[in-house]
Image (cartoon, grey):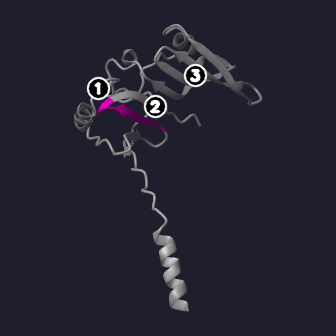
Amino acid sequence: MKQLCRAAVLVMFSAVPLKAQPAAPAYVPAFTCQQESLGIRLPRTYPMLRRIAPIRAETVGEVTNWGAYQTVFRDLRFDGLHLQVVTFSNDPQRYMLAGASITDPQWTPEGLLRIGQTLAETRRRLSEFGVALSESLTIGGDGDAVTIRATAGHIVELNYSCYTG
């Protein structure tokens, strides 16, 4: 009887498909969302950021009260660029990038990662800096990451996730 139960358990577990673990991101310790070579190049101040192109849509999200000041999560949409930023009521010049999605090549003119670039070219260019692009197509540091979305072997979207504290 015990052997029959063991056999039934083995059959039950062998019928359950195992999910493959997602590939780990390529780890680049110094990577940040606004790093010179792999990150996004954005203006230093929030007023300047708002002037980079016509804003197509803007959403004000969570407001957090910190006593002496408030932080406001904002969603800014430009053509081919979607930014998530945190602004500060006590310093209208300051913002922190929380995330970004790029789908238009005008926003990636000089970086190592460019919209429209082939994955083969991306891998070659990254290897010059000692970065091997993982199967997950993600590059991450200690707090920030960028994930590449590709179609037919070409980059069609870059999604940045940025640590804000």
Classify residue 87 as left or right of residue 107.
Answer: right
Relative depth, front residue between 22 and 98: 22
> Please, what is the three-letter code of the amino acid marked with disc 3?
Tyr
| Residue bearing the label numbered 2 | 159
Compared with residue 3, is residue 19 higher up or lower down, i.e. above or below?
above
What element does badge 2 sit on? strand
Q: What residue is rendered at 44% in x and 27% in y?
A: 34
The mark closer to the camera, 2 or 3, is 2
Relative depth, front residue between 41 and 6: 6
| Residue bearing the label numbered 3 | 95
Tell me which corner region of the image, top left, top right, bottom left or bottom right, holds residue 26: top left
Residue 90: image location, x then y, percent: 69, 20
Residue 65: image location, x then y, percent: 75, 29
What element does badge 1 sit on? loop
Is residue 146 on the magenta stretch? Answer: yes
How many other residues sit within 10 Å of disc 1, few (<14), some (14-19) or many (≥20)? some
Relative depth, front residue between 85 and 133: 133
> Please, what is the three-letter code of the amino acid marked with disc 2?
Asn
Label 1 and label 2: CA atoms lie apart by 15 Å
Residue 132: image location, x then y, percent: 28, 43
> Please, what is the three-letter code of the amino acid marked with disc 1?
Gln
Q: Earlier in the sequence, mark 2 or mark 3?
A: 3
| Residue bearing the label numbered 1 | 117
What element does badge 3 sit on? strand
Question: Which residues are the magenta region?
Answer: 144-154
